[in-house]
Amino acid sequence: MSTQPAPSQEAKKVWPLVLRFIKGAIHRDIMLPLVMHSLFTTLIALLHVRLQHNFALPASVVSSLSIVVGLMLVFRNQTAYQRFWDGRSNFAAIITSVRNLTRSFLVCSGGPGGAKQLSEAERADVERTARILLAVPDSIKNTLRAEWGMLSNSADSQDHGLLPKGLRAHEDEGLALPVQLMFFIEAFIARGHERHWFHAPQASQMTVQVNTLVDAFSKMETIRLTQFPVAILIHQRQVLALFGCVLPFAVVDESHWWSVPIVALIMFALYGIEAIACQLEDPFGYDRNDIKMDVIVEDVRVELGVMLDEWRSTVAGPVKKAMFEDDV
């Protein structure tokens, strides 16, 4: 039996990373400060050559500033990457909970062993809940991007709407759609327990999965809504600009015109680190270095759609049988 690659798998990159200047790179973001510092260094070098004046500064000045700049950039970059990694880890926890809940709902519908034939109402209830779970990753992605109402036309592989009919979102009143959808999931767990589909410990474990999902979403929401303190951002940018203005005076006496490319290269490295941190601190957007949420959500939707289609033809079919087991 052959398997198809997941939609997120990409072809190998042709160009080595050291030669990439557009896709995934931050060169455009730092072009303006690089040009400004290069022009300023050119002016200092011109005055030095024409006036034959020594503009050199004591080495201790540049050394002191370089230590401060280095520490600030390390702190900024590590904090930004931690936000990126926490966002990805929490999204993985959400996907795991959705997979676990979908598997349990589909396999256990009909009681222990799935032996009981489902009524039409029970079949519709399971399908409706499974489609809600299909919508959860999408709703979280849209909420984190402040894209409201994007799920209204979403459908599964059989063109059934993912959201329940007649659902009225309360996002304009402050209730996030993912949290609202969890009420439907929790209610289904309670109904399954009443129908004796899930025994008490199993229902309790499913509730834990729901709580884990909500907790992970709340942490992602915290990352999205908690901006980096503006005082740190202002001071870091000012110190970085100050260092770029002082640096030409430290190298112009020995390097003359070579001080222009030297300063440009040094500031390219420093501003590049700062620009990377700016992209990573809010990892839920559309930047190339952000989390590939669209790809992840599409992969999960395809995966869960296969589960639901298999359930329709086996557990919920005319002749009840186990999922993913070929007839012998």
Image: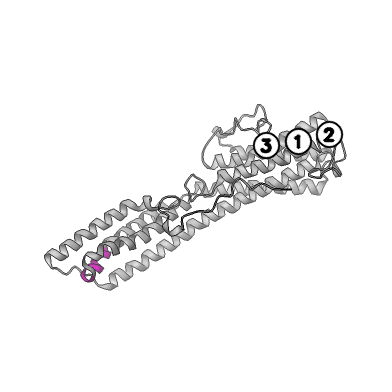
Type of amino acid under label 2: Leu
Q: Quarter-wise, where is residue 154 in the image?
A: top right
Helix, strand or loop under label 2: loop
Residue 132, numbered circle:
3
Q: Residue 248: within the magenta?
A: yes
- Dot 1 or dot 3: first in sequence order is 1
Magenta-drawn segment: 246-254
On the rendered image, what quadrant is the C terminus found in?
A: top right
Does the image show residue 210?
no
Circle 2 is placed at which residue position? 118
- Residue most extreme to the top: 166
Q: Quarter-wise, where is residue 137 in the image?
A: top right
Residue 223, numbered circle:
none
Tell me the residue at 19%/59% (across/down).
Answer: 43
Residue 126, numbered circle:
1
Q: Are marks 2 and 1 in contact (CB under 8 Å)?
A: yes
Residue 292 sits above or below residue 192 on the image: below
In the image: residue 251, left or right of residue 139: left
- Dot 2 or dot 3: first in sequence order is 2
The front one of 59 and 304 is: 304
Coloured how?
Answer: one colour
